Image (tube, rainbow, N blue to C red):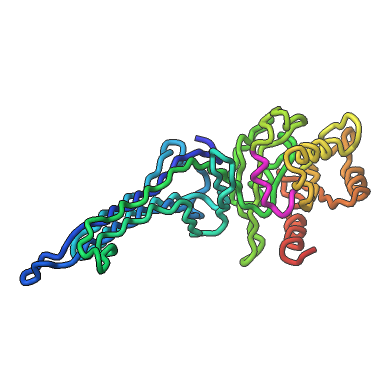
């Protein structure tokens, strides 16, 4: 099973327990007063964040969750037991929506965060609460309030510091494997990456960065070509984007044609992505030859539009130490 980053589930909180109608019946107290206890509250629907989870795969087979009902009250002022909560554990970065209305409900970002999404029904009051000077033996109690049912859409967006983007077969997966502990599938044909991959890059004993590699985009992705825009949401939380371009790519017109194709598709998905700090990596420098674009020409064109660029070879490791120093400067020294 591949990555599941969206799911729809149905949840229902528990009903409140009914209150009790009861009267004291003790020896030597023949006319005891009302002593019916309250019903227990129904269980809540709770969303809880877990860093042990990385996908929503669990919600492909299990789609319905119900909290327990509250128990009825008893005599001698005994309250009913509250219903057990239904706890739905989701990965960090999961957004929760009302599936029917599209209303955004909550964004789960921190480990062990809990949100009571739907409270259980309140338990009914027993007859002990309804005694008055003129009504000393009330035979009434409240029913518990019913729980509520809702259809929820879960949408996972990875929480990563750096996003790797580029056209298909530009070397993103190779770069991810060289920089982090990730082991993505790597091959020589386009669209080897079918789903996002995450990896953690260790800069030193105290510094780590999370990198997200998404499947390659092609021109027309916004119209569904290739794998489309489906996975771009996984770089929406990143601080910077590493644009990989291939030194062996032969442009039809402008020297930065592949870079602008990528930027155009990002803008069509979400214009805010263009506000992120972009860094261009000129990859496959081990394959540079006079019949193709030269790195110096690309870097000069990048300088003209005010962007930083670094020549690298993800395959051989050339330039990766300089890239780490560059990232350390951005994230930990602010430059």
Identify which residue, 129 or 218, lies in the foreground. 129
Identify which residue, 302 or 285, lies in the foreground. 302
Q: Position of residue 58 (x, y in %)?
A: 45, 42
Vertical side of 81 occupied by 264: above or below? above
Q: How many marks?
A: 0
Q: Position of residue 318 (x, y in %)?
A: 76, 50
Quadrant location of the C terminus in the rendered image: bottom right
**Residue 173 seen in render:** no
- The quarter of the picture where residue 226 lies is top right
**Residue 40 seen in render:** yes
**In the visual, does 129 lie left or right of 187?**
left
Vertical side of 196 occupied by 188: above or below? above
Q: Position of residue 218 (x, y in %)?
A: 74, 32
- The quarter of the picture where residue 62 lies is top left
**In the visual, does 102 lie left or right of 188?**
left
Identify which residue, 194 or 131, lies in the foreground. 131
Residue range (magenta):
231-243
- The quarter of the picture where residue 109 lies is bottom right
Q: Residue at x 73, y 42 (%)?
A: 270
Q: Residue at x 82, y 34 (%)?
A: 249
Q: Residue at x 48, y 58 (%)?
A: 114
Residue at the extreme left: 27
Identify which residue, 42 or 229, lies in the foreground. 42
Q: Residue at x 42, y 46 (%)?
A: 148
């Amino acid at each position: 099973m591949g990555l599941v980053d969206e799911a729809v589930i149905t949840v229902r909180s528990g009903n409140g327990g009914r209150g009790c109608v009861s009267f004291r019946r003790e020896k030597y107290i023949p006319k005891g007063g009302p002593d019916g206890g309250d019903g227990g509250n129904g269980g809540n629907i709770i969303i809880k964040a877990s860093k042990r989870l990385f996908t929503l795969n669990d919600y492909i087979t299990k789609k319905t969750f119900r909290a327990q009902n509250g128990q009825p009250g008893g005599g001698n002022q005994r309250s009913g037991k509250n219903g057990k909560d239904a706890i739905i554990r989701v990965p960090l970065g999961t957004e929760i929506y009302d599936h029917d209305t599209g209303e955004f409900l909550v964004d789960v970002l921190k480990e062990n965060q809990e949100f009571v999404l739907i409270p259980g029904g309140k338990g009914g009051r027993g007859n002990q609460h309804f005694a008055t000077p003129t009504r000393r033996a009330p035979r009434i109690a409240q029913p518990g309030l019913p729980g509520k049912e809702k259809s929820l859409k879960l949408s996972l967006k990875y929480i990563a510091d750096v996003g790797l983007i580029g056209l298909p077969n530009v070397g993103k997966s190779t770069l991810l494997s060289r920089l982090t502990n990730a082991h993505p599938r790597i091959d020589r044909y386009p669209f080897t990456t079918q789903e996002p991959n995450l990896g953690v890059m260790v800069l030193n004993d105290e510094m780590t960065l999370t990198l997200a590699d998404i499947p390659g985009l092609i021109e027309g992705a916004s119209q569904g070509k290739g794998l489309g825009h489906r996975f771009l949401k996984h770089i929406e939380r990143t601080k910077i984007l590493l644009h990989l371009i291939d030194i062996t790519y032969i442009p039809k017109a402008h020297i930065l044609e592949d870079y602008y194709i990528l930027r155009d598709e990002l803008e069509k998905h979400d214009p805010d992505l263009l506000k992120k700090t972009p860094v261009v990596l000129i990859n496959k420098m081990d394959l540079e030859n006079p019949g193709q674009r030269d790195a110096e020409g690309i870097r000069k064109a990048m300088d003209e539009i005010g962007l930083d660029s670094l020549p690298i070879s993800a395959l051989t490791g050339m330039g990766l130490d300089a890239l780490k120093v560059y990232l350390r400067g951005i994230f930990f020294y602010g430059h």
